[in-house]
Amino acid sequence: MSHEIRTPLNGLLGVLQLLNDDKTLKGNELLATSLATAQDLKRIADDVLDLSQLESGKFLLDVVVFSPVELGNAVVQLMHPNAEEKGLLLRLSASCSPALRLTGDPARLRQILANLVSNAIKFTDAGEVQISIDYQDTLQIKVSDTGIGISEERRERLFSAFETMEPAHASHYGGTGLGLSITSQLVEQMGGTIDVDSVPGEGATFTVNLPLATASEDSNNQEPSGQGNLDGRRYLIVDDNETNCMVISTAIVQRGAIADTDTSGLAAIRRMKEGGPGYDAVLLDINMPELDGFETLEILRTDAAVDCPVYALTAQLDDESLRRYEEAGFRDVIGKPVDFDEMSLMLLGETATSEAVERPASVFEESVFDQLIQNTGPEVMQKLVDSYCRDATARGGRVREALSAQNWQVIGQEAHALNNSAAMFGAMSLHGLCKTIDQKVKQEEFAGLEQDAQVLVDMVDESIEQVKRWASART
């Protein structure tokens, strides 16, 4: 159902976005209304998919470094037009420094905060909406409003799926009743809590507490920001839907790149076999007739000798599908409906010219290690440390042996196995390098891999010594 809804919605929303960017059509009320309606439909489709994944247990969180204050400012900027339209004051106060960096999933945290602020604005007709951010070992976010408030009876079932307003307000405010259910389940997935205080007729305050660890400001795993510029690059978009091809190629051209399109996997294979221009990346739709994305990718790699990154272009974004894309060798996934800014950032990060650089100093996040101790206790932690040191030593040795034989597949397998454990113990540089090596091997991009593997061996040894020092200092 997600795919069936998202595919036509992708074309509709994409065309409306492009028309909205056309200066000659600025101020067109019908266009603005159509765009807003399509965006509402997309949010509903996203909510249904999120709820399905959360309830099935097939939901994974990212762990990257981010600034909670910058995230709060971004949500304020996003929601400010909505508040202004209703004559409301939208304010953000933060007792923590903008330089504070935490580790967690900023995309999902942004979703939580945006849901709460959106609801506060919706149910407030006069006054203000206040966002407060504080960090004292735990991230606390409060969203307060001066709106209609919530009755005690409704508070008891507030976070249930499809729970909407009392009948007296439901027809006026509308809504699917999914937002708060998804928000509460996301908070629970992050190991946190969400509470609400309210007096009917006076407003409500939602409080979210999340146990997120701090991270150093210079960590190399920080969330990217800003819109990508694709000047001088060339991309091939392969999608059996001509509207999708037109929309995505137009967005890429607007960002300074050249875009070619094919409406079938066979056409793309034929283009590549005939010696088409060199591409920085291929964007390949998964669900196509004759040859689907998986079959097309395999032939592009084997028969057409395509060695550039290939991205899956799809509306199927459940965890099982994401694993299939990774196993098949796709570089990453561009979800439909396509967010053009996110797409350009993804393409920019992956296609930037690689040059040999001096190896940066290893980054270790002691706060991550301390958080693990708090979650497990000293006795279990010591067992985990011993297990990590044994496992990392063995895997580092296998990487050395594979390096001498230039067995890249073994190196990729060992890097993949080390990836999560390195992050769990706070070895963030090792974690990032493992992900890079794993991706290179899966994409059969072996340039520079020997140097990466040598650095990996050194970082493994460093991580073992650092983990031992931390453990010793706490016993």
Image (cartoon, grey):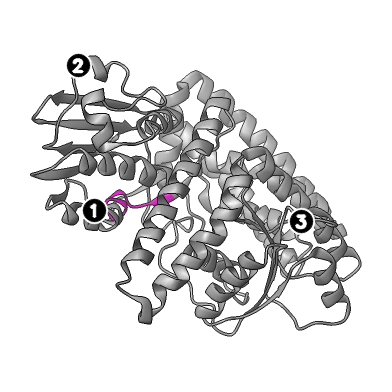
Image disc number at residue 288: 3
Q: Tag 1: Cα neighbours inside 10 Å, few (<14), some, or many (≥20)?
A: some
Horizontal side of 55 relative to 296 (left or right) equals: left
**Can residue 166 be spotted in the picture?**
no
Mark sitting earlier along the chain (1/3): 1
How far across and how far down the image is residue 242, in percent?
67, 67
Taking depth in this image into account, of 275 and 126 the one nearest to the observer is 126
Instruction: Tell me the kind of residue under disc 3.
Output: Met
196, above or below 267, in the image: above
Image disc number at residue 459: none
Image disc number at residue 152: 2
Quadrant assignment for the C terminus: top left
Instruction: Tell me the kind of residue under disc 2.
Output: Glu
Q: Which of the 4 image quarters holds residue 406?
A: bottom right
How far is mark 1 from mark 3, CA to CA?
39 Å
Residue under pointer 1: 82
The residue that appears at 78% across and 70% down in the rendered structure is: 307
How far across and how far down the image is residue 306, in percent?
81, 70
How far is mark 1 from mark 2, CA to CA?
28 Å
**Can residue 61 be spotted in the picture?**
yes
Q: Is residue 306 magenta?
A: no
Pointers 3 and 2 in contact (C-beta within 8 Å): no
Q: Which of the 4 image quarters holds residue 1?
A: top right
* Extent of the magenta region: 65-72
87, above or below 341, in the image: above
